[in-house]
Image: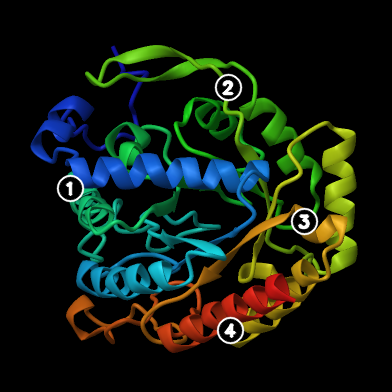
Amino acid sequence: MQRTYDVNVESFQPLSTPDEFKDAYPLGPDSAKTVLEGREEIKQILSGQDKRHLVITGPCSVHDETAALEYAEKLCKLREEVKDTFAVIMRVYFEKPRTSIGWKGLINDPYMDDSRDLMEGLRRARKLLLSITAMGMPTATEMLDPIIPQYIAGLVCWTAIGARTTESQTHREMSSGLSMPVGFKNCTDGALNTAINSMIAAGAPQSFLGINEHGLVSIVNTKGNPYSHIVLRGGKRPNYDSVSIREAVETLKQKKLIQAIIVDCSHANSNKKYERQAIVWKDVINQILMDTDTGHAIKGFMLESNLCQGSQSMKCAPEDLSYGVSVTDECISWETTEELIRGAHEKIKQHQAG
């Protein structure tokens, strides 16, 4: 009889179970402390109990662990320096959504040669998160594949759901069970309704199919995530301006949702040009300093930042890539990152003193 299932499947490769994986790369006490304190810090800021602002900054995507660790060490020092005004979180992105095809990130293709060794990618991702959190640096990432959180989510303090997946029921259900605050980005056209609906769905109990820590396919029953919020990333036009922020605040009020907004300084808000991230950053800082209702609703920023500015093509061999330069979206340099955060820190301190 002719086969009727798995016709286009080439092979199946079993993964280690999540609990076996965690046993091999265990969570140490320093990392656990960083994660628990980082999550609580973020929750306090989103709820308005902590008046500081979040800064989620780091490479568009991690492709070189050595460069990522160098960035983390620099950021850890800066985090301590500006802790009175900002809670700095490192962006450590391992998965990249694709409109068509392309490199899908360190987890999916760690060798950057289309060999797609996901087990090695998961190992490298978890080991990097363990190293960064052991420094005392809280981490943020985007959760794309709904199986992957069982392997790395225990090391993540903040999660984004991207513009292309915010509408996905699978990601809304997954977010309802995640252990950290989740930011939903507005859709690529700039509309807020999809992200608003995602917040409502993620805040409610859900039941869906997933895997448990033993790797068994299971019905996952969740409590709902009370710390889902919106991330403005622009659309057909930027949406970081005061009019767009006010529109978002009014919509959140009408829906009786948490009035907490994170502004993404990259993506459509900067037209994916790294030089424009500084313009967005400075505009939003000024809105915060004006002490308006809308300014108070702004709880933080996202920056795409790396050791060096710009981006590079992946047409050459991985060993020939320039060190510290993004292979996906353009990033601002470490020097610019430092300048923006330190400058805003001083402005806010002066404003508070005045």
Dot 3 lies on which element? helix
Label 4 Cα crowd, 10 Å radius (few <14 / some 14-19 / many 20+): few
The scheme the figure's colours follow is rainbow
Residue bearing the label numbered 1: 123
Q: Nearer the viewer, residue 209 or 291?
A: 291
**Residue 109 point in image, percent of width and height:** 27, 57
Instruction: Tell me the residue at 29%/51% (across/down).
Output: 107
- Distance from disc 2 to disc 4, alpha carbons, whole Å, reads 38 Å
Instruction: Name the residue furthest left.
Output: 24
- How packed mark 3 is, by other alpha carbons closer than 10 Å (few <14, some 14-19, many 20 or more), is some
Res 343 label: 4
- Cα separation between marks 1 and 3: 40 Å
Residue 271 in sight from this viewpoint: no
* Mark 3–mark 4 distance (CA, rounded to whole Å): 20 Å
Residue displayed at 70% across by 80% down: 282
Upstream in sequence: badge 2 or badge 1 = 1
Quadrant of the rendered image containing residue 316: bottom left
| Element on which disc 2 rests | loop
Please state which of the two labelled residues, at mark 1 or mark 3, is closer to the viewer. Answer: 3
